[in-house]
Amino acid sequence: MSLFLSTYVNKVDRKGRVSVPASWRARLSAESFQGIIVYPSVHGLPCLEGMDMRAIENMAENMDQFDVFSTEQDDRANLIFAQSRELPFDPEGRVVLPADLLEQAGISTQAAFVGLAKRFQIWEPEAHKAMLADVRARATRERPTVPVKGGAA
């Protein structure tokens, strides 16, 4: 499973082609599917969510905890798997973001690839800056922590 770090802003061309960050691409090229999986935000954010094939396969395996005919399983499958797109790398390391997903995320000429550890998001850069300001304000108020295995970092 790949690790996605940092934020990169890349140009989107008229055909929806965008370069995946080189450091991410290097790790993803070692995977069985050389590309990314993306789907609309499950939280209604104006962005795309993404991960590598192995991560989405693990997510699919975890769906076994739900009854195959349950509303919970159907809801999750419709939010993630039914809307997921497999986007393979072209020879230049780009992917083509489908027009409907670009529109849904409000992306036109630039895309911000935002690393979130085992997954990532793709945002219109100004919308990402606004969201990040909200996150920082909330963090200042709430002072969240992250558990670290083996003690403090």
Image: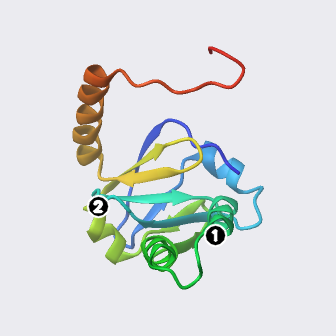
Residue 89 vs 151, above or below: the answer is: below
Secondary structure type for disc 1 = helix
Q: Quadrant of residue 51?
A: bottom right
The tally of labels here is: 2
Tell me the quarter of the picture where residue 122 sits: bottom left
- Residue 75: x and y in percent read 43, 75
Q: Residue at x 77, y 66 (%)?
A: 32
At a point 70% along the width and 48% down the height, the residue shown is 27
Q: Quadrant of residue 47?
A: bottom left
Q: Earlier in the sequence, mark 1 or mark 2?
A: 2
Tell me which amino acid carries mark 2.
Gly
Q: Residue furthest bottom?
A: 69
Which residue occupies 53% across, 54% down? 20
Looking at the picture, does residue 132 appear above or below residue 50?
above
Please state the horizontal and vertical placement of residue 67, each as a whole percent of the image.
Answer: 59, 78
- Regarding residue 126, the answer to whether it shows in the image is yes
- Specify whether 52 is left or right of 98: right
From the top left corner, tell me how far across and down residue 21 is, in percent.
54, 47
Please identify the residue farthest to the top as the structure is shown. Answer: 152
Residue density around tag 2, few if under 14, some if 14–19, many if 20 or more, within 10 Å: few
Task: Give the residue pinned by disc 2.
Answer: 44
Q: Is residue 91 visible?
A: no
Q: Tell me: 47 left or right of 54.
A: left
Q: For this rendering, which residue is in front, 2 or 67?
A: 67
- Towards the viewer: 107 or 84: 84
> In 3D space, how far apart are the residues under numbered discs 1 and 2 (Cα atoms)?
21 Å
Residue 9 rendering spot, x and y as whole percentages: 40, 45
What amino acid type should be assigned to the residue bearing mark 1? Ala
Q: Mark 2: which secondary structure? A: loop
In the displayed structure, would residue 52 be above or below residue 33? above
> Is 29 drawn above or below residue 23 in the view shown?
below
Q: Which mark is residue 60?
A: 1
